[in-house]
Image (cartoon, grey):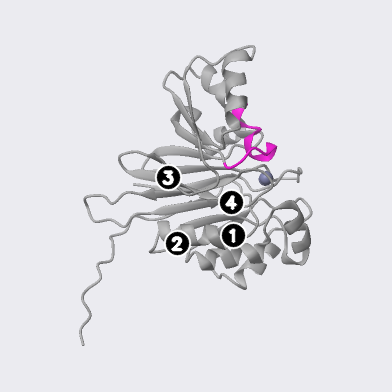
């Protein structure tokens, strides 16, 4: 009964050797979800051993190339793979134009349905649910309408703890987003991914481009009472992201570089029952 996130890319818009653009695969009890879809994702899915046909839904944070350039090739390859069931895509409303073009006006239109659901990037709301999990949006502060997502298991009948994952990219540091995450997951989100494009010494650049520094991401993770922080979306100017990890750990000890093809798992555990206090 897995709950795990596999990182397919931890770079930002500019190419850097060995780094690719943002895309995460979330496996919740063998249901697969993709979060953002940067360039070149088909080959990366093959290497990660995930069949694109297994992806039940795709959640897009915003329409900057490094988060959507992989979407259309992925949809095309699903067509070639013989997909027949509908594909669910969630993201800012403007994404519909891109999907409509590809579905109807491109040379080889896809033959399965794409069910696009626009996500209001100004407020937090339930955007998707199935029997075992639910997904909430989290408004972010970037240069274009942007939303994060919180994925949370529903309580099961065996008394297991609900596991959770928050994805926050791209954004200026947002105490409001931290508060929303802490309200959605009061016991503390198990895994939080937060972009850390810059080191804190370059915080002026971060501010100008609508991004966060590693230290700022760490403070947001602390404010949200997250249990573990994954950082990524590194600017190509930093050759070694471990310096960003070290910087974040000064404010949030449980910080880890979201290494490409690394998988971060949350084990299944019994919910802790709080016994009444004795005097
Ligand atoms: Zn980006
Ligand atoms: Zn962006």
Query: Mark on residue 140?
Result: 4
Residue under label 3, please give it: 135
Q: Nearer the viewer, mark 1 or mark 3?
A: 1
Q: Residue at x 52, y 22 (%)?
A: 78
- Dot placed on the residue nearer the N-terminal end, 3 or 2: 3
Residue at 61%, 32% (x, y): give it: 94
Q: CA distance from mark 1 to mark 2?
A: 13 Å
Magenta residues, start to end: 61-73
> Does any atom of ligand 2 lie closer than 8 Å to the CB of label 1?
no
Q: Quadrant of ligand 1?
A: top right
159 lies above or below 272: above
Q: Position of residue 123 (x, y in %)?
A: 50, 48
| Element assignment for label 4 | loop
Q: Residue at x 42, y 53 (%)?
A: 164
- Distance from disc 1 to disc 4, alpha carbons, whole Å, reads 7 Å
SS category of the residue bearing label 3: strand
Q: Which mark is residue 174?
A: 1
The residue closer to the viewer here, 37 or 42, is 37
Residue under pointer 2: 182
Q: Quadrant of the C terminus?
A: bottom left
Q: Quick check: marks 1 and 4 in contact, CB under 8 Å?
A: yes
Q: Residue furthest bottom?
A: 279
């Amino acid at each position: 009964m897995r709950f795990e996130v596999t990182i397919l890319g931890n770079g930002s818009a500019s190419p850097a050797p060995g780094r690719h653009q943002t895309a995460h695969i979330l496996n919740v009890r063998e249901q697969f979800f993709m979060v953002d879809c940067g360039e070149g994702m088909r080959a990366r899915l093959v290497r990660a051993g995930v069949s694109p046909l297994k992806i039940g839904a795709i959640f897009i944070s915003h329409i900057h190339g490094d988060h959507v350039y992989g979407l259309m090739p992925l949809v095309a390859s699903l067509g070639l793979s013989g997909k027949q069931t509908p594909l669910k895509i969630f993201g800012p409303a403007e994404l519909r134009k891109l999907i409509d073009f590809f579905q109807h006006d491109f040379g080889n239109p896809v033959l399965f349905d794409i069910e696009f659901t626009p996500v209001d990037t100004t407020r937090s709301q339930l955007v998707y649910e199935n029997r075992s999990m639910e997904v909430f949006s989290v408004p972010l502060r970037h240069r274009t309408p942007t939303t994060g997502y919180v994925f949370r298991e529903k309580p099961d009948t065996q008394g297991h703890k609900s596991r959770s994952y928050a994805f926050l990219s791209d954004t200026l540091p947002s105490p409001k987003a931290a508060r929303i995450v802490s309200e959605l997951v009061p016991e503390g989100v198990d895994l939080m991914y937060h972009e850390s494009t810059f080191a804190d010494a370059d915080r002026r650049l971060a501010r100008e481009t609508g991004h966060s520094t590693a230290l700022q991401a760490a403070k947001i993770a602390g404010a949200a009472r997250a249990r573990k922080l994954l950082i990524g979306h590194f600017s190509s100017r930093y050759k070694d992201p471990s310096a960003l990890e070290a910087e974040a750990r000064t404010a949030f000890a449980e910080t880890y570089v979201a290494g490409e093809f690394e998988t971060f798992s949350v084990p299944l555990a019994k919910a802790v029952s709080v016994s009444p206090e004795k005097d």
